[in-house]
Each structure stands twice: as C-alpha cells, then as structure tokens.
Amino acid sequence: MARFSAAVVALAALLLAGCVGPSRTDRDYREKAANAAESMVSVVETARLTVESDARGNSTARYTSLSLSEGEDDASSIAMSFEVVQPPSRDAEQLRTDLSSLFSEVSTVLGDLRIAARAGRGHELPSIAEPLPELTARLKKFMELAST
Amino acid sequence: MHAGLDLLDRHVVDRDGRAVGKVDDLEIECAEDGTVEVTALLLGPEALGRRIGGALGRSMGGIAARFSGDPEPARIGLELVEELDIVIKLKHPLHQLPVGRFERWVREHVIEPLPGATDATG
Amino acid sequence: MKRVLGLALGVFTAIGGFMDIGDLVTDALIGARFGLALVWVTVVAVIGISTYSEMAGRVATITGRPVFDLVRERTGPRIALGNVVVSYLVNALTLVAELCGVALALELLSDVHYLLWVPAVAVLAFVVLWKLPYEMMERVYGLTGLALFVFVFAVWQLGPDWGQMLSDVTRPSVPAGEGLPTYFFYAIVMLGAQMTPYEVFFFSSGAVEHEWDASQLLDARVNVFLGYPIGGALAIGIQAVAYLALQPAGIQVEHLGQTVLPVAIAFGKIGIALAVLGIVAATFGSVMETLLSSSYTVAQHFGWEWGKAKKPVEASRFTALTLLTLVAAVGVALTAWNPITITIYSVYLGAATLPFTYVPILIVANDRNYLGDHVNGRLANGLGVIYLVVVTAAALAALPLLIITKGGL
C-alpha cells in the first residue's frame, strides 16, 4: 500500500514538474522552444491577416487596433514565459539567445503596429507589417527543432 | 408506512396552487399495538436538516432556527390535506397555513423595498 | 406568425446554449486546431441534447412541473441536495463566464475595457429580469442571435473545396503534431460546451413559465427539434470558417477577436457587425439562461414559489437568490480572472457533471405515476441510455485526459 502511494506521489510530482518546471534535457528545452515559436507564429499570422483585412477595408478601426494590442500583449507573454526557463546546456543557451532576439524583432513590429493603429494611422499598417511573413518563416524553422 | 415514504419530498401546494414547499419530513405516531401512523407533514430546513442528519443536517437546522427563532419545523396536520396527486394539495390558501416564515421575511426585507417589485412582467 | 414566434423558446434556449461564450471560443479553437475532425461531436451533441430536452419538455407539459421539481422524490434528499449544490455552482461559474463574454464582445465594438462593461451588462440583466416579459426576452435575444448565421454564410464566401471538406468531416483524422489524448480531450470539452446542463433546466422551466400543457406537447417537440439543429449548424459554421481561414495560417484561438477574424475576411465590416451583434445577443441570452437556471434548480429543489414571469413579491426567495447570484457573479468577474480561463473551466466542469443532470431526467421520464402513457418509448429510452453511457464515459475520462494532456496543451 505504501509503495503504491509512493508511486502515485512520484507520478504526480513528475506530471507537475512537466507542467512548469525547469528543462532537464536539451530535448525538453528544444521542445519548449518549438512550442513557444509555434505560439508566436499564431500571433504573427493573426496580426498579418488583421492588417491585410484592414488594408482591404474589411475591418473596423476598433477591431484592428484591439486585435493588434492583444497580439502585442500575447507576444510579450510568450517571450517572457520562454525566457524565464533556465537553459540546461551551452547549446541551449545559444538557442535561447537566437530565439529571444527573434522574439524581440516580432515584439518591435507588433508594438509599432499597435501604436500606428491606435493613433489612427491605419494607412501605415501594411508597410510596418512587411517583415511579418519573413518572421513567420524564421519562426517555423525553430518549430522544426522539436522533431530533431 | 409505504404511503409515508411516498409522501416524502413531494411538492405541496395550497388551495390556489401556490407553492408551499416540499415534504421534508413526516410526523409519525406509534400506537400501542405497534402500528405506525403519519399524523403530519413537516416542512422547512429544520425538518430537512434532521432527516439528512450528520454535520450538514445539523448546521442547516441550526441556521434556520437562528433565523426564525423557533427550532421546530412548520407542521401541516394531515387533516389539512385536500388531495394526494403528483403534488399534495392543501385545503387552505397560503396565508392561513402555518408556513412561509422565510418567504415572508425575504419579501418584506429584501424584495418589497425594490421599485417595481409588485409588477408582473408576464 | 404566432406559430413561428412560438418557436422562440426553443431557438432562444438553443442559441443561448450552443452559442454561449464557451462554444464561441471552443468551436473556433477546435476548428483552427483540428479542422473539421470534431464536427461529428457537434452532431452527437445535438442528438443528445434534443433527446433529453424532449424528455424534459414532455415532463413539463404533461405534469405542469419542471423536471427538477420531481427529481427530489426519485433520488432522495441527500443525492438531490448534492446535485443542486453542484448544479448551482457550475451554473454560477458559467454565468461569470457569460457576463465576461458579453463584455468582451462589446469591447470589440467600443473603446471601453471589458471590465467596465461587466457591471453595465449586469444592470441590463437585472432590467430584463425585473421588467421584460418572458416571451419578449426569448424573441429579442433568440432571434437577434440568428445574426450568427453570418458564420455559416462565410463558409460559402471563403470558397472552400467542398469535396475536401466533406471528406474531412466524414473521415476525421487527427492532424499532424496532435496526439490522440489531446483529440479526445477536446472532444469532451466540445461535448461539454454544447450539452451544457443549464440548457435542459432552462427549457424545462421555460415550458412551465409558458404554461404549456399537454395539448402543446407537439409545440414543445418542434421547439426542440428545430432549435437545437439550428444551434448545431451555427457551431459547425464557426468550426468551418476557423478551419478555412485560421488553420492554414497556424493561428491558435485565444481571443474572441480571432473567432470573428474569418468573418472579417469573408464579409468585411458588415460581417464583423453582424457577428458581434449575434455574439452579444447570444451571450446575453446565455447570461439570462444561466442566471435563471441557477435559481430555478435551487427553488425547485426546496419547493419555493419561482418564476421570472411572476411578480417579484410572489416569488421572493427565488428573486432574491437570482439577484444575489448576479451580484456575486459580477464580483467574481471583476477580480479580473482571465475570462477565457473561466470559460474553459466552466465548460470542463459542465462536462464532468453531465451525468448528474441527465440521470434524474431519464428516471423521471420513465415514471408512469407522473407521465401515464406518455412515458419514454423505446426510442427515447434507447437514445437516453446510450447518451447516459456517453456522458458518463466523458465525465470519467475528463480528469485523466486533463492531466495527460496538461490541460490540452
């Protein structure tokens, strides 16, 4: 009976550790990076489609600016959740540096988009949003890391 | 006794069809020859609490008693029952029955002070 | 025309139930993530809820009493009390989510933060409760909710490959990168979102508020068999447009705005306007449904006088509880707990407690003392039992799958 309880406690601890804990292996860390990149793709693509709709006259000013604000907030929380995790090795540290700087670029673009939208400069959005497709492509390369 | 079990938890209405409550417990009398007879319906959290029993039941009864100042549940003698069907129908209208303390309290202290409380929305 | 308006209860219940904030978020989330691979769950949900609502409606019209009124006699006071407490809490949590849902939809239209809208929505709910006739409530919110058909029309507008779509629906497959446990976790989430407990309570009590009697059994049935398929069609519409517009881009749905994005792409500003109008109406309808259902179950359990259509003074405890629930819900909403998180919890808890809702209905609908010759026939019982097995399995699998998938990650 005691052994069973111990096993259950160990299993629970394992599962809980998996939720938020530090990454013990490189593979774990790469998977976290890939998940973060995947979430970031969602944010970038939402912004891209929103700007596209807006440029076509398919969106209201309010919808566009709310959507872009939410995107900016999402991007910073994804970046923060990833950056808080301690990289388990030198290789992982390098990965972190690379991905962080990519996230930074994304945040900058989203920030500029939000500012222009809220300031009523909707006509500037398409040009500010130009880097987005390339950012998506680079993020997708990081997503492939989980399978290596 | 079988009829008694059937009565428990049944909905009770007054002469006009207004809700009186549920049969939360029964008052029974044991005759000397061992037969058992239902003499009254008991309504209210005091009765229900006693029936559920345990800590929960006791606290229900306790809170209710503190509210109404009376630890005894509302009692409807069987002579007041008109009809036993899907619901139990009583002979008298609500205001002539010894029930409804809680409802009256809530009505006077909570609902009536609000504007429009006597308007039906339909 | 009167006949058509008589369907308002069914449409209102279904739209409030199938298009509440939980559905709006999960349908889009699932469409974006799993494509059309879970559409079959919607079909299953529509059949299930129709089966049980028909039973509840039948009980209400034949006996003149709502199902929950009779549950206590059949299951005993302890179990019934437990059931009431659980139902009340789940309904109340759902109410918090719906209040936030209306507020989030209004945020899409205005420059006002959603938290500021929450009290305004509660005030409107109070006014509707206190002043607006029951039938007008159904018609206004139920029929306006039909604006959500813009999602269905958007499917055509987005010019899909119909053959591919049909294949994806009828031969569902788990997308690459997703595991089977996650697939089933979301199947349960969607089932819970669409077969929400409060729908049946509300329909049953609504039938009594309407004072439908045995001669209106057919009306009750038409309400059920028309209303829920409409709800189901809308749910499939939202999944489909998310599949068409969001899945290819790899967008994960985390905001109400993303649910609306496909409609913006399809129809532009008019689309956004109609979608938001429909969302506001449907989620507000859900506010009223969950609010009333919370107090309906408590009042019916304890034998209080109840009814929105009654004067407040005639149903004081019921009315007081309704007001108290509304105020408490606003309080919880204003803690700024993430509304999407609240939504997912309420949906998940709804799924986990489905058996509690449906077992008593099946029992009562088979009782000759109440229904005489109108007890369940073989079809109703057959479907009833199958669905009981389904929802129980779902409820049992819910917690393990939550743990295994780490909350659907």
Image (cartoon, rainbow, N blue to C red):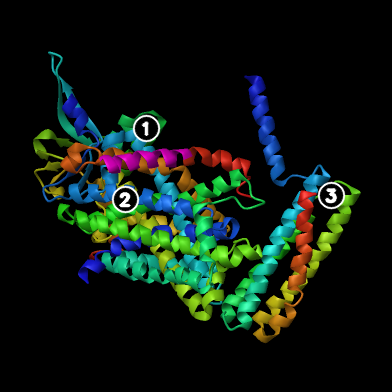
Side (left or right) of B5 relative to B93: right
Which class describes the residues within 10 Å of circle 3: few (<14), some (14-19), or many (20+)? many
Residue A68: x %, y % from top left:
65, 73
Q: Nearer the viewer, mark 3 or mark 1?
A: 3
Q: Where residue C53 is drawn, which disc sits there?
A: 2
In the rendered image, the vertical position of residue C116 relative to residue C22, given as above or below: below
Q: Is residue B23 magenta?
A: no
Residue at horizontal 63 percent and vertical 82 percent from the top? A55
Mark 3 and 1 residues: CB-CB less than 8 Å, in contact? no
Q: Secondary structure at mark 1?
A: helix
Q: Nearer the viewer, mark 3 or mark 2?
A: 2
User: Mark 3 = which residue?
Assistant: A87
Residue at horizontal 70 percent and vertical 68 percent from the top? A44
Pick whichever, C231 or C202, lies toward us: C231
Q: CA distance from mark 3 to mark 1?
A: 57 Å
Side (left or right) of A32 relative to C370: right
Residue A100: x %, y % from top left:
82, 61
Side (left or right) of C300 relative to C30: left
Q: Are marks 3 and 2 on the same chain?
A: no
Q: Are marks 3 and 1 on the same chain?
A: no
Magenta region, residue range = C378-393
Q: Are marks 1 and 2 on the same chain?
A: no
Which class describes the residues within 10 Å of circle 1: few (<14), some (14-19), or many (20+)? some
Instruction: Tell me, yes or no, if residue C93 can be seen here.
Output: no
Mark 1, chain letter?
A: B
Residue at the front extreme, as displayed? C163
